[in-house]
Amino acid sequence: MTTATTTVRSFLLRRAKALLAVASLAVLAGCTAAPPVPPPAPPAAALPDRLLLTAVEFDLVPGWQDDKLAEVVPALRRSCEHVARLPPSQPIGQDGRGGLAGDWLAPCGALRRVAEGDSPAARAYFETWFRPYRATNNDRAEGLFTGYYEAELRGSRHPGGPYRIPLYGRPAGLSADPAGNGQSFYSRAEIEAGALRGRAPELLWVDDPVDAHILHIQGSGRVILDDGSAVRVGFNGSNGRNFIGLGRILLDHGKIATGDTTMQTVRAWLKTHPAEAPALMAENPRYVFFRLLQGDGPVGASGVVLTPGRSLAVDPHFVPLGVPVWLDSKEPDGRPLRRLMMAQDAGAAIKGPIRGDVFWGGGEAAFDKAGRMKSRGSYYLLLPRQRSVPVALATSEAERL
């Protein structure tokens, strides 16, 4: 090896070491200068349910000018009659989200001046006395809206012949909400096997186990008796077990196709498979108890008679019963469903801040509409402009409440 070659190699080696040292310093400098990476925010779906209400003006409520608001006035009158019987200091809804009962006295009093059938007067009334609030679940405005109806069954006051399915009243000593009171009670399968025989009042006997189960899901119904008379029954508590929908059960067993879980499909399958139906229906552990109703019906969880097409079942943990709710969703046939309704009922499957069940009335036409409704949508709560209790905190550029 020549001296020149050795000199060149030594030079290149020293240069490579120098460059490596510079690069190492740069890497170290970069590591110390880079800010720490913050942990990722939890996805919205992982956040606990929380109803947020953002104040808006009526001109931002979609379809507000198009609704026949006179149609909701009778439903509001019923809720006002109920509120008038409450102590003025009683909160309306969880944490008084709807104010106090006394806050509703002036709006309900003014309602007396709105003539039946006068939609312009009704619109002026709502715009004067109420403020709309856009409802979201954290930052999500959309939820699921379904439908329900008043079931109609055939029955008798006495067992015998085709009338072999009992409609039980609530057993003595059992609270209306056993789960909430730490009580454990028989499952549907145990009750249908005879666990309550002689231990609970047998109000009526009906002839069809599928219709009886659907009655349990709907919560109220009308029974045409064998003597020609008719009687209404309403919800009077449950066994406190979780609800599992019949559509879910049939789907899990491969009895119906995915996407075909309408009430019509479920009822038809169960009625045409009487040998399999009882065991499958027993997989829904929730069992409902009833009471006989006098006068008009059905009666919702708020204690008032429901109005077809204008009463809405909600989750009362979030939405106060008795408040007007502007629904922005779709009919079962896809047409817009934008109308003012009253939050007057609740249901075991109606859970969450943005969730509703439209009451369509009674009979097969209502059954058809209710069974096919499964629409996405949102809503706005209408609350009295003057309230003793502030509305729950909401993030809004327009108003932070």
Image (spheres, helix red, strand yellow):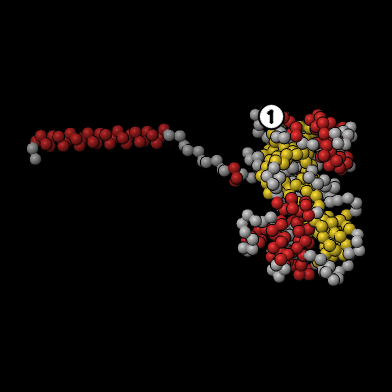
Which quadrant does the C terminus fall into?
Answer: top right
- Residue 5 horizontal/vertical position (percent): 11, 36
Residue behind mark 1: 399
x, y percent for residue 360 = 78, 48
Task: Looking at the picture, tell me which residue is in the foreground, 70 or 334.
Answer: 334
Count of numbered badges drawn on the protein = 1
Asked if residue 340 lies left or right of residue 262, the reply is right
Left or right, 147 with respect to 252, comes to right
Q: Is residue 188 visible?
A: yes
On the image, the x and y values in percent for residue 320 come to: 77, 42
Residue, x 65% and y 42% (percent of image)?
142
| Position in image of residue 370 (x %, y %) | 74, 51
- Is residue 125 in sight in this rendering? no
Q: Is residue 38 left or right of residue 396?
A: left
Measuring 78% from the left and 41% from the top, which residue is drawn there?
Answer: 341
Classify 10 Å Cα crowding around label 1: few (below 14), some (14-19), many (20 and above).
few
Q: In the depicted view, which residue is nearer to us: 324 or 67?
A: 67
* Residue at point 76%, 59% (across, down): 214
Q: Is residue 159 above or below residue 288?
A: below
Amino acid type indicated by mark 1: Glu
Viewport quadrant of the N terminus: top left
Quarter of image, res 157: bottom right
Image: 235 above or below 135: below
